[in-house]
Amino acid sequence: MIQSNSKLLNYIHLLMTDDAALHQFLVDPIQAEENHGITKAERAVLRRTVAHLSNNSKNGYSVARHSGSYRRSLRLLQNVLHHVGSKMVQDSLKHPETSESTYSFSMIFNFPNNTASGPVDYTFNTNADIDKIGGPYAWATPVYTVSLDNPNPTVQEVYDAVNDKYFATPVMPYETVTIDGAEYVKAIVPLGVYPLTADLSKYTTSDDYVFWFYSINGRADGNISGNSGNIGESFATKTLNAGDTVFWQLIAPDAQYHFLPCN
């Protein structure tokens, strides 16, 4: 994966994937600042992000925290940085003479650690399985930003525009599967190397397995209705608003992430 120009984002990635590095930061954050080139302010924000109580305990208190709890805190900061960063990229592309006729959209892809030398099928994997390889947010791509004439394109149209803009061949090819007449992403091919598959057509609505899940501006769309969750809308029909950022992640958005089960 491509390293970021931001030393902070690179360091967050390290903390998300390396237990020894996370432990070193918790024990001696000042030394970590010196070793990894982050600024004093960045270190202070990181330290405050991970120093507080577990964000996953029901009563807000926890005697001891495991590494996954610290990483959920780091993920919050990472998500904020990615979201704000995508808007800053969009702002930098605005020109007075074109801003009223073109509309910016961004897309960011998240991947677990994957050391395989060929295609990987994650179908029937759970969140716990993905956590064993660094979790769904171990790697994040740069912000891919495109400008379109349409203020309300579909997620697929923005995805296709990203693939048309970046490199001679598509930067993130995808494969789809059709379920009840609607298209869903079955596989993503990072940098066009080999597919990472999670075929949700093999699941039932009561299953709790990972799939290529998109969120808009860091929020799931229409995930709760009454006392149960909804089947997600196809990326081929879901429309966006100008300035939206779409995040892709390999995840099962279950109760741990405050999603309700489907009927």
Image (cartoon, rainbow, N blue to C red):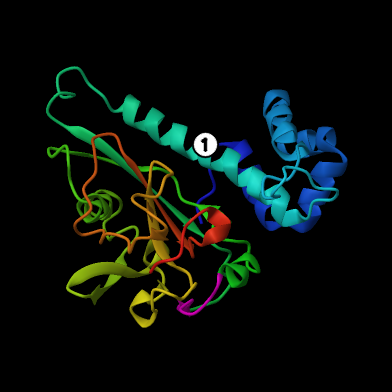
The image position of residue 46, as x and y in percent, is 70, 35
Relative to 205, say whether 245 is above or below.
above
Left or right of 12 on screen, residue 83:
left
Residue at screen point 33% across, 78% down = 201
The image position of residue 24, as x and y in percent, is 83, 47
Name the residue beneath numbered marker 1.
Answer: 80
Residue nearest the viewer, comparing 80 with 159: 80
Quarter-of-image position of residue 18: bottom right
Relative to 262, say whether 37 is above or below.
above
Q: Is residue 15 visible?
A: no
Is residue 253 a member of the stretch shown in magenta?
no
Relative to 45, say whether 155 is above or below.
below
Please give the count of numbered marks on the rendered protein: 1
The image position of residue 221, as x and y in percent, is 34, 49
Residue at screen point 68% across, 29% down = 45
What's drawn in magenta, residue-wise?
Answer: 119-126
Residue nearest the viewer, comparing 80 with 230: 230
Residue at screen point 78% across, 55% down = 66
Q: Main secondary structure of the magenta part?
A: loop
Relative to 43, say whether 187 is above or below.
below
Residue nearest the viewer, comparing 225 with 242: 225
Left or right of 38 on screen, residue 154:
left
Residue type at mark 1: give it.
Val
The image position of residue 207, as x and y in percent, is 46, 76
Q: Secondary structure at mark 1?
A: helix
Other-residue count near label 1 (Cα within 10 Å), few / some / many at <14 / 14–19 / ≥20: few
Left or right of 245 on screen, residue 36:
right
Quarter-of-image position of residue 205: bottom left
Quarter of the image containing the C terminus?
A: bottom left
Q: Is residue 241 visible?
A: yes
Is residue 125 a member of the stretch shown in magenta?
yes
